[in-house]
Image: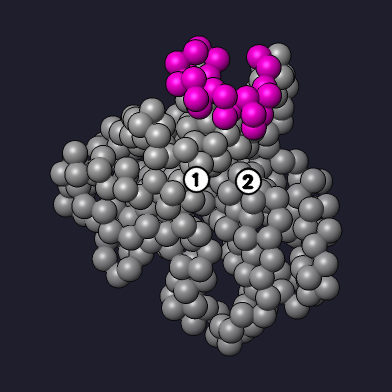
Amino acid sequence: MIAIVDSGSTKSDWVVLRRDGHEAFRTEMMGLNPFFVEENTIIQEIKNNEELTQNAAEITHIFFYGAGCATEAKNAIISNALKIVFPSAVSIVKSDLVASAYAAYNGIPTLVCILGTGSNSCYFDGETIHEETRSLGFILGDEGSGNNLGKRLLQAYFTKKLPQHLVEKFDEKYSLTIEELLSNVYANQFTNRYLASFSHFVADYKHEPFIQKMVFDSVTEFFENQVLPYPEARQSELNFIGSISYYYEEIIKAVAARFHMKIGTIVRKPIESLVEYHQQYILPELQ
């Protein structure tokens, strides 16, 4: 059997295929980002999954695509953990950017944009991934992402820029003090997830003018910093991947129109398209 994994910072989706390409089962667990999760934690998290442990001996290949998997050192954390749980499997670990390129590919070159917990972009010509910019992470970058929207919401709330009726809704939902906020931001292993959790409030009130402008500004910064640097940006389709892309499709299209760019497809969960890519392009090579 062959396992295909798409792991963000918040959760990871696993789809296990039989050798003939048909699905055996699928499961999910916490996000396995090696920047935030240690090797032993990854091992234990996978072992706690009954379906995976029961079928571990039958899995021969694992294609793992994850947030944080952009260097050999970080990829080794994932590879070592997979080797412990799946000793007979060949593990291939690549970044979530590669997964998004595969999931967004429809036979023609495309500029791929990720808007989930974090954000990133690349140009995929069908064979090679080109990066004009690198993601600077949730502190210095991640424009347009869930954690960026959460950060903007918190800034607006605590600096008293949030409209009063939204302040009342925020208080009703969170009852958050500045002490609790700072503790969770500066003493939390998963600060990016914590910030992104507030993006749910943004989504709940996305039709409010103040929220719409906040999202528009965040997405505009994403275009300026992670799309415009590509020389192919205005000649290629922009295909978007991730939950934030899905929730704010209309705003994304409005920002794209401002820059005279064309939106192609928007995929909420890349795992489905990622599986199709492997069935069409990768699994035949393993036969």
* Above or below for 241 versus 191: below
Kindly check if marks 2 and 1 are in contact, taking CB atoms under 8 A apart as contact.
yes
Figure coloring: one colour
Label 2 belongs to which residue? 10
Q: Residue at x 68, y 17 (%)?
A: 177
Label 1 belongs to which residue? 116
Q: Residue furthest bottom?
A: 20
76 sits to left or right of 45? left
Residue 86 placed where, x, y %?
A: 77, 65
**SS class, disc 2:** loop
Q: Residue at x 78, y 75 (%)?
A: 55
Residue 247 placed where, x, y %?
A: 44, 49
**SS class, disc 1:** loop
Comparing 28 with 85, the one in front is 28
Residue neighbourhood size for the residue with mark 2, other residues' Cα within 10 Å, grouped as few (<14), some (14–19), many (≥20): many
The quadrant of the image that shows the N terminus is bottom right
Residue neighbourhood size for the residue with mark 1, other residues' Cα within 10 Å, grouped as few (<14), some (14–19), many (≥20): many
Q: Amino acid at mark 2?
A: Thr
* Above or below for 211 versus 285: above
The quadrant of the image that shows the C terminus is bottom right
Find out whether residue 168 is within the magenta segment.
yes
Q: Find residue 18 and report its image quarter.
A: bottom right
Bounds of the magenta segment: 156-178
72 sits to left or right of 284? right
Q: Residue at x 37, y 53 (%)?
A: 240
